[in-house]
Amino acid sequence: MSEDLKLFLESYDPSQYERPSVTTDVVILTIDDEKMLNKRKNSEVNLQVLLVKRKDHPYKGQWALPGGFIQMDESLVVSAKRELKEETNVSGVHIEQLYTWGDEVDRDPRTRIISVSYLALVNKEGHDIIASDDAEDVKWFNIESLSVMNNGKSIELSKEINADVMVTTNIYTLTSEDKEVTLNYSITNTLIRKKATQNKETVQVISSDPSIAFDHGKVIDYALERLRNKIKYTPIAFNLVPDYFTLAHLQSVYEVILKERLIRPNFRRKIAPMIEETNLYETGKQMRPAKLFKQAVNWDSWE
Amino acid sequence: MSEDLKLFLESYDPSQYERPSVTTDVVILTIDDEKMLNKRKNSEVNLQVLLVKRKDHPYKGQWALPGGFIQMDESLVVSAKRELKEETNVSGVHIEQLYTWGDEVDRDPRTRIISVSYLALVNKEGHDIIASDDAEDVKWFNIESLSVMNNGKSIELSKEINADVMVTTNIYTLTSEDKEVTLNYSITNTLIRKKATQNKETVQVISSDPSIAFDHGKVIDYALERLRNKIKYTPIAFNLVPDYFTLAHLQSVYEVILKERLIRPNFRRKIAPMIEETNLYETGKQMRPAKLFKQAVNWDSWE
DNA sequence: ATAATAGTGTCTTTCAGACAGTATAGT
DNA sequence: ACTATACTGTCTGAAAGACACTATTAT
């Protein structure tokens, strides 16, 4: 290191500049397999998100994503994992960076806060959730959503300058497993395309009390969008099921995420290169027993 | 607002916590149409990135992406645009968030810095680059890269626990337009897949002097990867060409980004829904004149 | 036998890849 | 006429969509 640089570093004082705070927030999703007592029917599955009830201001008493301020000596992803573990007791899960929220300067009433969001996926079995001392409660919420689209209007801003506008409103109802809490909100995404440039504006409207804290409705909306995209061309969904699973179960996971029914033979054909047969079978149902599969270890059909 | 909350906000002092600094960095790419004097051949195109030569520590004299510290009252994307304008004089371009770098705590020698990176695409004509007072110089660099892959090895970590490992090394040579500066470095991406979880580790190795500052080689590598993906299913490439363009030119843009030759009839078929015919023609070449096209204004074939 | 779901075979349609052909400027 | 590129038509084969059929369990 040169003398010059050494001198510079010694005289560098970061506290002379005003800095924003940085948090990590985790959208942690799972699939709930409604334990059906009925032996004559397969169980239905629900997509769920884990929220914590805030004990302190701001948004005291509201439900929020697990997350918090990063520490100076920890990496971003470690911070996300730590907050998740501290606030909900969940650890050892798939986690990936989603998006960094910082275009609204006043998204937090305390100070300027930039939030790096993460997507985590877990197999619900084997993860007991426990609220930390900081939180009043922690619950899994069933995600129900309805999309209303106003498809691709082309509007003329002026002569020779046109814009395409696509407005999508996603209406969410999050209901806690025990049915005690219901959160309602809607997210309106406005996509504006002028020539090749696309801009997106997202608005969150809260419509129940208690509801979702901060702009976390937006973050969940974004996470679901990402999951819907990635599930189509990566084996990410295997994080949501046990090590051994039936194809019917895996298919229902795809269906609840994609919000559409799939045709079985086609699904099996598409998923085939990602899975491996075992010689185990599901039992206890009054129907033909389903073979159990596991994820294949190979790179075929990966991105 | 409740009295309670008001009290909380009044007593909240952000300076009691130590905070990292936040910067925005912009990978700005363009296509250079080598002005060929030859009337009997079409010109070749190059993919270029804009770098600034640092006047100050750290990495003084090295080449870096335009970027800098965000201000407390400006949004992230506005910060990225401001830095781009200030340091290079480029403005009014397509810009989108890429990734937030903060897993290495010591990626900047001054203090803990988290960097939100953006991808910008411009049509080179109509953007004159000017170095700011803060920078010693600013130049467009031709991007040449070579990929070496070590394909999908499966390794056994222990009984019943396997991992797939895929190592890709991208060797970069960035040469300034005037051929005066050459930067060499390589980026090694190691993808590790255990069950459904994929982790990525990226290592940057510098191999020339001067070379690229900070971890900006990684950021450029990531940006090119993103561009290669997005160009396949969005009209993002239209940001790189003039309003009116020939299909041969557009095809060569795709080819230089994807690093492969495309078969013309197939390219035209795929691009057809995104473009609109005009009744203009290219002139001055000793060959059949090419029709000029423009981007279509509709949402077909968009994501 | 019946109910319910597991699993397979195959026809059709759509789309991507490859190549061969025709068209047209300037010299 | 020649060169270089623009543009079009069409064959082929792979992949996606749709549906009909057979298989297997507990009661």
Image (cartoon, coloured by chain):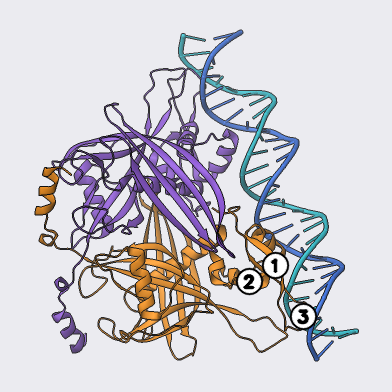
Chain colours: A purple, B orange, C blue, D cyan
- Front-most of residues B173 and A108: A108
Among the 4 quarters of the image, the one containing residue A33: top left
Q: Marks 2 and 3, Cα distance to the nearest angstrom?
A: 19 Å
Circle nearer the N terminus (3, 1): 1
Percent coordinates x, y for residue A120 in the rendering:
34, 47
- Crowding around mark 1 (Cα neighbors within 10 Å: few <14, some 14 to 19, many 20+) is few
Pointers 2 and 1 in contact (CB under 8 A)? yes
Judge from the rendering whether residue A9 lies leftward or rightward of residue B65; answer left or right.
left
Q: Marks 2 and 1, Cα distance to the nearest angstrom?
A: 9 Å
Query: Element type at marker 3?
Result: loop
Circle nearer the N terminus (2, 3): 2
Name which residue type carries label 3.
Answer: Met
Residue carrying label 2 = B244
Camera-nearest label, 2 or 3: 2
Query: Element type at marker 2?
Result: loop
Residue carrying label 1 = B278
Name which residue type carries label 1.
Answer: Thr
Residue carrying label 3 = B287
Badge 2 sits on which subunit?
B
Marks 2 and 1 on same chain: yes
Percent coordinates x, y for residue B33 in the rendering:
58, 80
